[in-house]
């Protein structure tokens, strides 16, 4: 009960909606016959699952941008690293069913005349090890990167630039065949996950549900962090870093914590993304992907918890529609959307609604107070709606 009040009804309503989707979408796909009006076609399940992983990625970015003020243009790198860790596990599950029939080496290694499996592929035949690497690799990179960046007091646009440089450097590295990650083609042709056929409708429904559960846990985690004393300190660092340092806190430690947690969340999103789309390649490191994540959070409203999720779902659904209608002009639409939001809705969709609601509530309170002071009423103030 105390935890429920601490997180607030908005968080629990959002979690409830996400978990409801985790149940209803698989039921609509598996339990209802194709002729039923509520039947969910099989091709939509992995598409919606991809949207959910994007929502988790946007939520991860919002933790550092919306609540700490760190505009990261490199979160696509953490997402891709988590995806590659899962892809390595899925490649090891192919075994002798590959084109070349090698039970140990993936097909691309056989094609490139590799004689033995690289040491950093060891252990990825076990799911628990791959799941650990999904969180550890992005988290460790974020910790090391953030340790040096924040200790050097790199802030603002300079920090954004070096995060983008980080993901571009990884893009160039993973394009190389001698890195042992499939080069330009990446990792694909997956067969099984945890022994279940990856193309089966039930498996895809299960992956969708797993993505929704991960997003719900992410919402609870971010909600708990941002509403705790640490969350208040994060907002203080965002709004007045020098004052926070002056009164004795260490803003770099706060930033490092948030940046590392955010990277782990992004890695988990990438790991859930790969088996649903069936491929992971270096294009996921492209800087434009990280910029798109920023657009999602900005459209929905950063620092609102629900805003980045809504933004990710709306923008990616729009991308699906517009790339079919006008594939040559989609990037212009995306750029125009970001400019529009920046100029007209700087708080995003949810932020604008919240701001309008707060302003309306303040006017009602002021009117009630004036009415009470004039003797025309009992002076009572309207109750404060739960947020």
Image: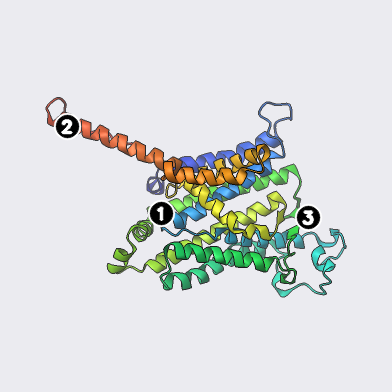
Real-space Cα distance between discs 1 and 2?
Answer: 35 Å
Element on which disc 3 rests: loop
Of helix, strand and loop, which one carries label 1?
helix
Q: Which residue is mark 2?
A: 370
Q: Which residue is the site of mark 1?
A: 226
The residue at the point 42 percent across, 62 percent down is: 156
Crowd rating for badge 3 (residues with CA inside 10 Å; few <14, some 14–19, many 20+): some
Question: Can you give x and y, in whole percent of width and height, for residue 54 in the image?
Answer: 58, 49
Residue 289 seen in this snapshot: yes
Residue 13 lies, in percent from the top left, at 47, 40
What SS does tag 2 mark? helix
Name the N-terminal-most of marks 2 and 3.
3
- Which tag, 3 or 1, sits closer to the chain's start? 3
**Image mark count:** 3
Q: Quadrant of the C terminus?
A: top left
The Cα atoms of the two marked residues, 3 and 1, are separated by 40 Å
Where is residue 348 drawn, in percent x and y?
Answer: 44, 43
């Amino acid at each position: 009960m105390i935890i429920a009040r601490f997180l607030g009804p908005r968080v629990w309503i959002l979690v409830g909606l996400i978990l409801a989707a985790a149940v209803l979408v698989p039921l609509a796909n598996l339990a209802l016959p194709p002729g039923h009006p509520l039947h969910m076609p099989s091709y939509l399940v992995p598409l919606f699952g991809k949207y959910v992983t994007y929502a988790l990625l946007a939520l991860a970015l919002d933790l550092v941008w919306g609540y700490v003020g760190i505009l990261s243009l490199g979160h696509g790198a953490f997402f891709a690293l988590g995806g590659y860790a899962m892809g390595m596990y899925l490649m090891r599950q192919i075994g002798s069913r590959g084109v070349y029939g090698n039970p140990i080496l993936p097909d691309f290694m056989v094609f490139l005349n590799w004689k033995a499996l690289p040491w950093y592929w060891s252990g990825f035949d076990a799911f628990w090890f791959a799941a650990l690497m999904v969180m550890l690799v992005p988290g460790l990179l974020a910790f090391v990167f953030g340790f040096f960046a924040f200790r050097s007091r790199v802030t603002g646009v300079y920090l954004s630039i070096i995060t983008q440089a980080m993901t571009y450097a990884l893009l160039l590295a993973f394009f190389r065949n001698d890195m042992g990650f499939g080069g330009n083609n990446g990792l694909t042709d997956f067969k099984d996950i945890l022994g279940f056929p990856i193309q089966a409708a039930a498996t895809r429904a299960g992956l969708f549900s797993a993505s929704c559960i991960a997003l719900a846990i992410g919402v609870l985690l971010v909600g708990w962090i941002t509403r705790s004393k640490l969350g208040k300190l994060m907002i203080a660092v965002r709004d007045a870093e020098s004052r926070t340092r002056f009164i004795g806190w260490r803003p770099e430690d706060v930033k490092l914590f948030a940046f590392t947690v955010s990277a782990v969340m992004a890695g988990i999103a990438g790991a859930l993304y790969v088996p649903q789309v069936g491929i992971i390649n270096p294009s996921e490191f492209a800087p434009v992907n990280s910029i798109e994540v920023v657009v999602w959070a900005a459209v929905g409203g950063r620092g609102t918890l629900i805003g980045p999720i809504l933004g990710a779902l709306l923008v990616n659904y729009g991308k699906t529609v517009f790339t079919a209608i006008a594939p040559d002009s989609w990037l212009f639409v995306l750029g125009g959307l970001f400019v529009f939001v920046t100029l007209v809705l700087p708080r995003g969709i949810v932020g604008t609604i919240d701001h309008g609601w707060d302003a309306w509530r303040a006017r009602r309170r002021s009117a009630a107070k004036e009415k009470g002071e004039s003797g025309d009423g009992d002076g009572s103030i309207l109750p404060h709606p739960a947020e």
